Image: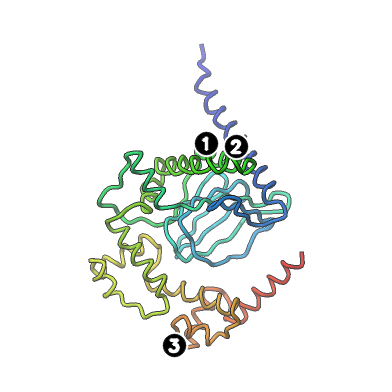
Amino acid sequence: MIDLTSHRQPERELDRERASRDELIERISRATHGKERIEPLPGLWLRRVTAPTEQGHGVSFPAFCVIAQGSKEILLGEKCYRYDPAHYLIATAELPIATRITEASPEQPFLSVVLKLDPALISSVMVEAGHLAPRRQAAVTAIDVSSLDAGLLDAVVRLVRLLDSPTDARFLAPLVTREIVYRLMRGAQGGRFQHLAVLGGVTHRIAEAVERLRTSFDQPLRIEEIAKELGMSVSGFHHHFRSVTAMSPLQFQKHLRLQEARRLMLGEGLDAASAGYHVGYGDASHFTREYKRLFGAPPMHDVERLRKRARENASF
């Protein structure tokens, strides 16, 4: 006799995944109809985009990201992370990134779910599950992509399904979110996921350095001083900082400065020289060269291009 059990189980799993993805597509499409981005529950964002996008720059935050339809890529330093409906992405720190939606159309729009990760919740789940982080932990990049399994996908669908029942969502959404955190902690990115709850070790010290650079990016960069305060050698600090952020401290600071200068010109009407000076550049020509290298055009040309694109989008 031929045992068909081993064949039926994978087929059932595939059918379950297909049904979950189809439901997720339908629910995000319905919830975001006529809107590009909504936050139906605190810390939960749904997005709908009907065409591929140009590369945009921003700052990541601790989050779990799932794509129901389409695909996207994120650049962190020199590394490129691509994900789609078969994969999820986790970010565990606030880092300067570039993003681009690579697959989207009016007929099959890009549809995604982003769930903000709360370190306090993660620590609570880890303690409750008896899954304590090791005291010593190697530094790993704060962003990565893994395969999305049926159980995790099902939990995401159940969280989005609660949008139809606001009363139930008040009580059940926190429970489903805890389940998602638990599944992530037990999954392929469990080690990286623990970064958000680790209270000691290399990762925590690099997180302190990231926060310091992020809040004082307009100040001169004193690597020796930061390394000493963290109890690390200069070479060790450079090595671990690059491991977590995929860039050197100087590159990290440069990206933050240039993104803030772009915001000042676009949002507050500053000219290029004033914006460069405001974020820490003493030489206007140096600022212009680095800005063009990152964004592909001189400061004011880039800002005018962004304004023109915004006017065109507003006309639809």
How many angstroms separate mark 1 from mark 2 (CA)? 8 Å
Query: In the rendered image, which residue does mark 3 sit on?
Result: 282
Q: Which mark, residue 150? A: 1
How many angstroms separate mark 2 from mark 3 (CA)? 54 Å
Drawn side of residue 151 relative to residue 123, left or right:
right
Q: Secondary structure at mark 1?
A: helix
Three-letter code, disc 2: Ser
The residue depicted at 35 percent of the width and 60 percent of the height is 243
Drawn side of residue 2 relative to residue 225, left or right:
right
Q: Which mark, residue 81? A: none
The residue depicted at 35 percent of the width and 77 percent of the height is 221
Three-letter code, disc 1: Ala
The residue depicted at 63 percent of the width and 40 percent of the height is 165
Q: Looking at the rendering, in which quadrant would you find the C terminus?
A: bottom right
Q: N-terminal of the two: label 1 or label 2?
A: 2
Q: Quadrant of residue 95?
A: bottom left
Q: Which mark, residue 20? A: 2
| Disc 1 and disc 2 in contact, CB within 8 angstroms | yes
Q: What's the colour scheme? A: rainbow
Q: Secondary structure at mark 3?
A: loop
Q: Secondary structure at mark 2?
A: helix
How many angstroms separate mark 3 from mark 1 (CA)? 53 Å
Q: How many marks?
A: 3
Residue 288: % across, % down = 52, 83
Residue furthest to the top in view is 1
Q: Is residue 301 above or below residue 68?
A: below
Q: Nearer the viewer, residue 273 or 212?
A: 212
Pointer 2 local density, CA inside 10 Å: few below 14, some 14–19, many at least 20: many
Three-letter code, disc 3: Gly
Pointer 1 local density, CA inside 10 Å: few below 14, some 14–19, many at least 20: some
